[in-house]
Amino acid sequence: MPGAALLVLGCLPGLAAVLALVLSTAGAERPVALRSPRPPVQARSAALHQAPRPRIVPRTAWADDGARTQPPPHYDDKVVAVFVHHTDSPNSYRCADTPRIIRALYAGQTRHRRWDDIGYNFLIDRCGTIYEGRAGGAERPVTGAHTQGFNHRTAGIAAIGTFAAGTTVPRAMTDALAALAAWKLGLADVDPRTRARLVSSNGGSRYRQGATALLPTLAGHDDGYRTHCPGAALSALLPAIRERAARLQGRR
């Protein structure tokens, strides 16, 4: 996510850390999809281009949903694109601390921005561990709150850290990103190297409300919103990540 004010999370305890991370949510919007009384399972295509599901650490590993009333999730019919973000937080964390970092992101977005849940559908740490973010089911087309104008029919994947120009992006992180995107897009037989037609739901995006945009199916946050997210270093790797995701789907 874009960095409105980059603060050092490791030096900020408690509430200060929460306030630091809540500043990383510009460019997202509150989801407005209708709630489904029965959570839909995304229909699997009959085509062969599906990748295996990577290991995803469940939400229960970090969330304390008993601490607040968790509203029902929102759903779309399927996911046809994913947006890649960075959390604009320090890179020097221990991977054992990832659940604490995600809880701080969740607290910032739900307590201070008063969102119904964390905006990202998934988060990946520097060791390549994938975490389920937003509630509703990792395999389901859950509407997130991650890319203003383009939350519908998309999934948001956040790389935990800051990846501006000159930063080294861990190979374990990019491998996990490719595996996750390949699996998630493969559920609808979407090629990670192509483009998808998405309708902007908010004029705060790069496109006026109601406009149809042709965006990469594996996109950076800056493809849909005026931001530096996911950082120049990570953005530069997206072409290679798309190719790896396509190979994982069995495409040539």
Image: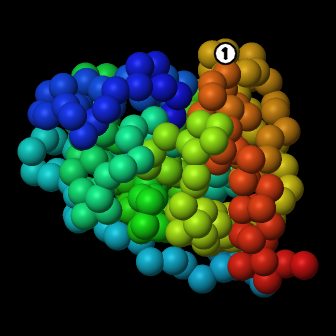
Residue 30 at what x, y percent from top left?
A: 44, 28
Residue 203 at what x, y percent from top left?
A: 67, 15
Residue 111 falls in image quadrant: top left
Residue 119 visible in the current orientation: no
Residue 154 at what x, y percent from top left?
A: 62, 48
Considering depth in this image, is 119 or 90 the residue closer to the camera? Answer: 90
Crowd band around label 1 with a 10 angstrom C-alpha radius: few (<14), some (14–19), many (20+) = few
* Residue, far front: 166
Left or right: 92, with 176 as reference point:
left
Give the residue displayed 45% in from the left and 35% down from the top.
88
Residue for badge 1: 203
Give the residue displayed 46% in from the left and 19% down from the top.
4
Left or right: 36, with 210 as reference point:
left
Helix, strand or loop at label 1? It is loop
Q: Is residue 64 above or below residue 249?
A: above
Q: Amino acid at mark 1?
A: Gly
Considering depth in this image, is 109 or 235 the residue closer to the camera? Answer: 235
Residue 250 at what x, y percent from top left?
A: 79, 83
Residue 159 visible in the current orientation: yes
Q: Is residue 186 above or below residue 158?
A: below
Left or right: 186, with 139 as reference point:
right
Q: Is residue 95 above or below residue 119?
A: below
Residue 61 falls in image quadrant: bottom left
Give the residue displayed 54% in from the left and 61% down from the top.
170
Give the residue displayed 90% in from the left and 79% down from the top.
252
- Figure label count: 1
